[in-house]
Image (cartoon, rainbow, N blue to C red):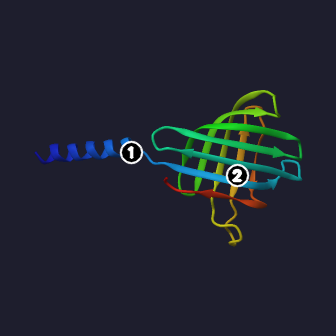
Amino acid sequence: MEARKLLLIMALATMVVIGTGCAGKYTGGGWIEGAEGGKANFGFNMQSDGLGGVKGQVQFHDHSNDVKFHGVVDDMEWSSSSGTGAGIATVNPGGETGPFEIYVEDNGEPGNMGSEDYIEVWLWTGYSHGGYLGGGNIQYHGPE
């Protein structure tokens, strides 16, 4: 009888976790050093409603080699300190489209020593680049 109660409790707990989900949101903007020097600017937002719905956008421009893309985020995984988004990007306005990923870390508020936020992007074209922010902020907004 005790084993059946334990199994029922475990099943109910699993249903609650899966059924309610967890919403979360990341936003950010700023710059990192470009892949070949100079600056790479970015701005993004991505959020989950906790029920499987994800939305967001990414703008990225590496001035050192003129790689520009706009991406629409339709998949996301996150914690309170880092997040990964994925979707389809268009390289250079009106250019080719294909998959991309973005990885971000919120390591604290700007100006706090040792709290540099981090961003990295990958494109299907083979371009990938990342670094700690030279300016700007990445922010985790927690469950909504």
Q: Secondary structure at mark 1?
A: helix
The percent coordinates of residue 85 (x first, y second) are 62, 42
Question: Is 122 placed above or below 24 here?
Answer: above
Residue at x 77% of width, y 44% of height: 60
What's the distance in space between the residues labelled 2 and 1, CA to CA?
Answer: 29 Å
Q: Quadrant of residue 51?
A: top left
Per the image, the residue denoted by label 2 is 119
For marks 2 and 1, give the one nearer the viewer: 1
Question: Is 94 placed above or below 62 here?
Answer: above
Q: Quadrant of residue 4?
A: top left
Neighbour class for label 1 at 10 Å: few (<14), some, many (≥20)?
Answer: few
> Which kind of residue does numbered mark 2 sit on?
Ile
The percent coordinates of residue 15 (x first, y second) are 32, 41
The percent coordinates of residue 142 (x first, y second) are 52, 56
Frontmost residue, 94 versus 102: 94
> Which kind of residue does numbered mark 1 sit on?
Thr
Query: From the viewer's perspective, is 63 left or right of 46?
Result: right
Neighbour class for label 2 at 10 Å: few (<14), some, many (≥20)?
Answer: many
**Mark 1 or mark 2, which is nearer the start of the sequence?**
1
Residue at x 71% of width, y 71% of height: 111
Q: How many callouts does the rendering have?
A: 2
User: Which quadrant of the figure contains the N terminus?
Assistant: top left
The percent coordinates of residue 102 (x first, y second) are 67, 44
Residue found at the very far front of the displayed protein: 144
Check residue 20 in the rendering and tell me which mark sits there, or answer none: 1
Residue at x 64% of width, y 55% of height: 105
